[in-house]
């Protein structure tokens, strides 16, 4: 939580955390998110923005479960070429670290690595450069919108079925 809070603070953005049970079935997730969205609507929220790129089933899921709120949904990156987006991300000066991998498609050796041109060049052509199919996840630590870069340390690697992740502090 501390890193997420530091990231939001450096970006000058408000952050609202939604408590989720463990394990968290979809019904519990939806209930918690809808409750928070309702609270935020009372504070003036009118739109929810998603960074999804091309997974139609995920978009449909989001549209279906949020439709009852009356909030408008925005998908500003929808349909964009992920290779071009990855290059633009780096050209703009954003910096990120690879914090999770799907072990079925990526080795743990990528954990803790910078998301940079070298990382992108090492990816198999079957792996989306934005990780849109769940191949990997990143955590952004710096860029033109940040007031200051986040300094992180990597820690232990954790392995769960379908996801290996590295502790970031």
Image: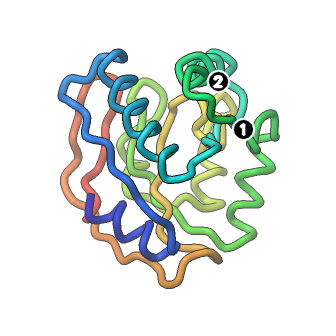
The C terminus - image quarter: bottom left
Label annotation for residue 75: 1
Colour logic: rainbow
Residue 59 is labelled as: 2
| Residue lying at 75% horizontally and 57% vertically, measured from the top left | 87
In the image, residue 30 sits, relative to residue 113, either above or below, namely above
In the image, 102 versus 29, the foreground residue is: 29
Along the line of sight, which residue is nearer the eye, 64 or 120? 64
In terms of sequence position, does the residue under pointer 2 or pointer 1 come before the other? 2
- Please tell me how crowded label 2 is: few (under 14), some (14-19), or many (20+) other residues with Cα within 10 Å: some
In this rendering, the answer to whether 131 lies above or below 141 is above
Outermost residue toward the bottom in this view: 148
For the point 64% across and 51% down, which residue is it? 120
Residue 16 image offset from top left, x and y in percent: 38, 53
Q: Are marks 2 and 1 in contact (CB under 8 Å)?
A: yes
Residue 142 left/right relative to 112: right
Secondary structure of residue under mark 1: loop
Image point (40%, 33%), residue name: 33
Residue 69 is situated, as x and y percent measured from the top left of the image, at 55, 27
Give neighbour class at mark 1: few <14, some 14-19, many 20+ (Cα, 10 Å).
Answer: some
Return the mark for residue 102.
Answer: none
Which residue is depicted at the point 36% across and 77% down?
A: 151
């Amino acid at each position: 939580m501390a890193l997420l809070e530091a990231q939001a603070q450096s970006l000058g953005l408000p952050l609202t955390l939604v408590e989720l049970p463990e394990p968290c079935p979809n019904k519990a997730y939806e209930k918690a998110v809808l409750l928070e969205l309702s609270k935020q609507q009372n504070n003036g929220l009118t739109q929810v923005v998603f960074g999804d790129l091309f997974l139609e089933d995920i978009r449909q899921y989001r549209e279906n479960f949020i439709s009852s709120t009356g909030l408008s949904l925005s998908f500003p990156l929808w349909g964009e070429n992920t290779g071009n987006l990855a290059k633009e991300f780096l050209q703009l000066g954003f910096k990120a670290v690879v914090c999770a991998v799907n072990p079925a498609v990526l080795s743990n050796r990528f954990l803790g690595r910078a998301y940079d041109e070298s990382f992108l060049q090492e990816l198999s052509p079957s792996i989306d450069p934005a990780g849109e199919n769940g191949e990997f996840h990143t955590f952004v630590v710096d860029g033109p919108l940040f007031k200051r870069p986040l300094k992180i340390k990597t820690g232990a690697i954790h392995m769960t079925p379908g996801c290996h992740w590295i502790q970031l502090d």
